[in-house]
Amino acid sequence: MNCIVIDDEEMARAIIGQMIENTPELKLVQECSNAMQAIKYLNQHQVDLIFLDIHMPDFTGFDFIQTIKNPPKVILVTSDKNFAIEAFEYECIVDYLVKPITEDRFQKAIQKAHAKQLTVATSLNKMVAEDNANEFYINIDRRLIKIEFSAVNIVEAKGDYIHIKTEGKNYVVHSTLKKIEDKLPKDLFLKVHRSFIINTKKIIDIEDNSVLIGKDVIPVSRANRPELMKRLNLL
């Protein structure tokens, strides 16, 4: 993790800097003697962790946190224990170190920072997974176009291409029916013919061996008809 130290005391910066140097997963990229210097640095660089003194001339550590947008993880460093309760009102603050700092206490703070980082990463991955569960992308003229699964009516194979018909627009993509079938949710889509996959929620009418979706009449093969009938909520 890239770190910066913000403290108006040179000795304090040196001590924390040495502890960072002794921790392989940390890299000290900047030392700042005041908040304004740190703000200028953060406007141009991205860091993962800030060691922040609460008591600084003209600008407290809390003032600093409130000033920057999307603050990274922060470990407060202070000689005053009285700010602990206020400190944990800020989501970005992962720990609160009281001077003089011991090596053991420093490492515990780093473990908390790592745990916070993993939690955030897990949350982001979950959000991405949930988004991907509702949509897919196709490549059209070097543009990636997002299509929600619920908007797809029909997928039709034509030679080396597939035609994706949605409620508002149709797309032609160089791909195979098998490739897109693997990406479509099985509870929503069904391959009813060697050349067609349909969104079963979009069926308007079924007659003999065909289904009506929008204005399209789609053939249903004899082999796939039993599975289609299972999907229907028949009275």
Image (tube, rainbow, N blue to C red):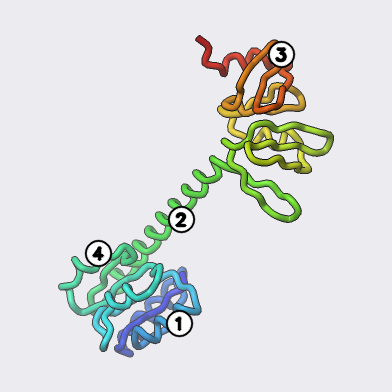
The residue mark sitting in front, 2 or 1, is 1
Decide: is 59 above or below 218. Answer: below
Give the residue type that dot 2 points to.
Answer: Ala
Residue corresponding to mark 1? 41
Q: Earlier in the sequence, mark 3 or mark 2?
A: 2
Q: Earlier in the sequence, mark 1 or mark 3?
A: 1
What residue is drawn where x is 20% and y is 79%?
A: 79
Q: Earlier in the sequence, mark 4 or mark 3?
A: 4
Q: Secondary structure under badge 1?
A: helix
Give the residue type that dot 4 points to.
Answer: Phe
Bin the neighbour count of mark 1 within 10 Å (Cα to Cα): few under 14, some 14-19, many 20 and up.
some
Structural distance between the alpha carbons of marks 1 and 3: 68 Å
Left or right: where 29 falls relative to 216? left
Image quadrant of residue 108?
A: bottom left
Q: Which mark is residue 209?
A: 3
Give the residue type that dot 3 points to.
Answer: Asn
Q: Which mark is residue 88?
A: 4
Bin the neighbour count of mark 2 within 10 Å (Cα to Cα): few under 14, some 14-19, many 20 and up.
few
